[in-house]
Amino acid sequence: MQNACRKFLILILMLCSNISFASPDKFIYDTTEKVLQTARSNLNEAEKERILTEYFIDVMDIQWIAKFVLGKHWAELTNPEQEKYNAAYKSYLINSYVPLFRRYNGKDVSILRIENLNAKNFSVKTTIEHEGKMLQIEYRITAYDQNYKIRDIIAEGISMLQTQRSEFAAVIAEGGVESLISKLQLKGKNP
Amino acid sequence: MLRISFIYLLLIFIISNSLAWANEDDEDIYNISSSEINDPFEDFNRAMLRFNNTVDFFILHPLALSYGNFTPSTLQTGVENEINFLRQPVVLFNAVATWDQQSISDTIGRILVNGIFGLFGLIDVAAIADISDHQNSFANTLIHYGAPTDSPFLILPIIGPTDAVHAMGMPADYASSPTTHHLNSEQLYTKNVATIIHNKYRYYEFQSTLADSSLDEYSSLRSVYWQKRR
């Protein structure tokens, strides 16, 4: 009876647990390998773009990033404005980064180090060869249930989040949030 | 027994979920600098960026791409190595000025190894020997002795993004370089032009990507510059 209770308890514990079973480095390794394989494949450019776009949406924490890079201005927006901004930002991010992945023809990624930033967030430091040089790329990822999403990519010390936040602040300072949304929509349509 | 198991289970459920509830935003860990970038000369800098982009478009990028497309990659590597080698005396001078012992020993090592075994700098044998490459300049010396680390951001004609302290250090670096005193004016001109074109080619992809993906190229460039400086 006690044995059965113990087994039942363990089963319920496993079902209720929010701790992810996959490791952060495996997530990054699998992610980059899929991107590299797609970029190097013999598929036509349109098909590569479609696959990479789907994959990009799946692995990037776009909604969180959109809110973060807007900083204090997020709270100033109405709900319809937030939706409009989110949609514009998503198009902008996809059109900015997916073409870069599509053009990549380097070699495989090497995982250097994983660091726990807190209970849910991790830093995975990697190197990747590109045109004969080794590039240092750090991924900041966060755990959601059984999966991870990327929140920041830091290439050779340059953070995507920091750069965008600084840039968006300058655009807002000059023309307000509407100006930012217009520019995002324009960039999202014309990569 | 079942009541105890239920209480235990409830505790485990609450604790495991609290890992998800706590710190949902997690913004603190992203190390985003909240301080504004020191940029009192923004109008001037923006004008300089427009000027530099024009010069790049009509002169430097065509030259750089020609250089990149028609120069074998091994020769490009040799040029990169030579530019770096010729910079080592300036690095050594400033390493001594700040008594940075690690930098002094590494730089002397690089000069000797690359000078003797690397065809006077064309081959970076020191990198194979894992001797670190340092970047000491007169700006680092000024900062060591009290100059601010966040001096005003500047964009200079042709040179590009820098800051006030690094701009002040440039004449000293130029004066302390042996090439300034041992090359004739034609050789010095060739060396400087070759350096500019090589570096333009080296950073062409980055510069193009930044310009294409930015909503405001100037503020992106400024942010990138400060992130690399830190």
Image: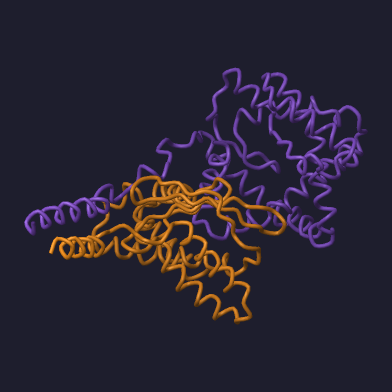
Residue A50 image offset from top left, x and y in percent? 50, 77
Snapshot quadrant of residue B165: top right
Query: Which percent across, then down, holds residue B215?
Result: 49, 56
The purple-tinted chain is B
**Residue nearest the viewer, comparing B216 with B101:** B101
Q: Relative to A184, does residue B175 appear above or below in the rendering?
A: above
Report the side of A188 relative to B87 (left or right): left
Q: Residue at x 81, y 37 (%)?
A: B85
**A141 and B218: which one is in front?**
A141
Residue at point 64%, 30% (across, down): B166
Quadrant where the C terminus of chain B is found in the figure: top right
The hue used for chain A is orange
Question: Residue at (54%, 32%) from the top-left corner?
Answer: B152
Q: Quadrant of the N terminus of chain B?
A: bottom left
Above or below residue B116? Residue A163 is below
Q: Is residue A139 above or below residue B225?
A: below
- B206 or A78, nearer to the observer: B206
Q: Residue furthest left?
A: B3
Between B9 and B55, which is closer to the camera in this rendering? Answer: B9
Residue B183 x/y as whole percent: 91, 33
Residue at 53 percent across and 59 percent down: it is B213
Q: Give how far across and how far down residue B84 sits, in percent.
A: 78, 39
